[in-house]
Image (spheres, grey):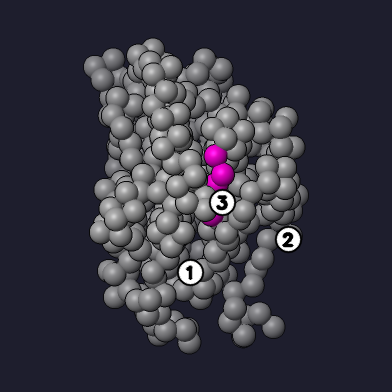
Amino acid sequence: MKHCTKCVMPETAETLGFDNAGVCSVCKQVEFKQESIDWTARKRDLDAIADAARNCADYDCIVPFSGGKDSTFTLLYVVETLKLKPLVVRFDHGFMRQTLIENNTRTFRTLGVDVHTFTPNWQVVRKLMFEALRRRGDFCWHCHTGIFAYPMWVAIEKKVPLVIWGEPSSEYSSFYGYDEAEEVDERRFNTIVNLGINAEDMVGMLDNSVNSYKVEARDLRPFTYPPTKDLRALKLRSMCLGSYIPWDVRKQVDLIRDRLGWQGDEVEGVPPQYDYEKIECFMQGVRDYVKFLKRGFGRTTHLTSIDIRNGRMTREEAEDLVKHYDGKRPGSLDIFLRYLGISEAEFMEIVKAHAVEPHSPPDLAWAQSNRMNQKPHDFDQWSTVVGDRDLDR
């Protein structure tokens, strides 16, 4: 399998391309970001956007918020640097961890912000997880679509014409490049977010015989992108903060730790020095494991590649970490299988069907013997409640 000659990303990564020297497209984008962008001019553009939004509604902007490193930094920057009054919109995907909840409380109280939280119907979520896994090899459809669609509905309801997200996708993939303006709009939603399945299609795909809850079209409204006419009527702007200021995760994590008391956590399959990464979801280990089974790489490949691009790690050091951490079976898989009511053999068969050539996924025996050595400290707090009476007694 071909890998970037600079970082350690493989050819199976979505959207990745290589130049004649074997350097991947994301490395080239980050090089462009570091060398060719006039960030002073972009900051002036950002200030103009903020000034135009100030005092236009009850809130100057909406900040979609997971509580992870990127949304926490974005909220801090919006409040303390741009001096805007935000409404924080939090989509509760169902897998929040205690450290994250405590981080969120400190952040909200320190910055003094209003918070709007939405938690979708769990029985709907369970069905969406299975259907997305079966059809796309990615069980996070409800999370992808909900996080990016629901804040837009709130913006329309509250008549707030500006939504500010964190890093642009060009920091990690090649759907967009740093040489173009990346708006977080319906085009991006349909290109990157919804896995090629819109909510209307999903309604017809779901098996309503699985449990007693019958999913209707209105159940999926939170996962549906709002009508264009409503967004245009509001003249809504939805943009990435990282398109206007240079995004540097390590520096930003240091800042939120110092300013907000933000704390990292253990994450399955992630080296301890990256304790700031993906702490917001206790299903993250399963998500990364699915990626490894499908594409032959996991979270450590992604993280070490970022450090290589920023001159903080050698390729040899990255390869050693990848070998040690990527591809281990997470303990959270047992909880995941319970949620969906499937066996590990069924899970492996589903994921195997979505493998990306030239990667060849391992078999069930290999997977079961290649387990993570230990579970995160809060593993026993992760909910195993399915909601079916026969399972939850």
Circle 2 Cα neighbour tier, 10 Å, few/some/many (<14 / 14–19 / ≥20): few
* Residue in view at x 58 percent, y 61 percent: 117
> Which quadrant: the N terminus?
top left
328 lies left or right of 154: right
Instruction: Between residue 347 and residue 34, name the one nearer to us.
Output: 34
Q: Position of residue 267 (x, y in %)?
A: 63, 44
Instruction: Between residue 78 and residue 296, name the one nearer to us.
Output: 78
Name the residue tied to disc 1: 125
Q: Magenta span has 13? A: no
Name the residue tied to disc 3: 88
Determine the CA span between mark 1 and mark 3: 23 Å
> Which quadrant: the C terminus?
bottom right
Q: Position of residue 391 (x, y in %)?
A: 62, 80
Q: What SS does tag 2 mark?
A: helix
As drawn, which residue projects farthest toward the front? 55
Foreground tag (2 vs 3) = 3
Would you place residue 102 above or below residue 220 in this image?
Answer: above
Circle 1 Cα neighbour tier, 10 Å, few/some/many (<14 / 14–19 / ≥20): some
* Amino acid type shown at disc 1: Val
The label shown at residue 381 is: 2
Determine the CA span between mark 2 and mark 3: 26 Å
Q: Start and end of the magenta stretch?
A: 84-89
Q: Earlier in the sequence, mark 1 or mark 3?
A: 3
378 lies left or right of 361: right
Q: Earlier in the sequence, mark 2 or mark 1?
A: 1
Task: Evaluate if marks 2 and 1 touch, with contact meaning CB atoms under 8 Å apart.
Answer: no
Judge whether residue 7 can be spotted in this image. no
Judge whether residue 35 can be spotted in this image. yes
* Amino acid type shown at disc 2: Gln
Q: What SS does tag 3 mark?
A: strand
* Quarter-of-image position of residue 295: top left
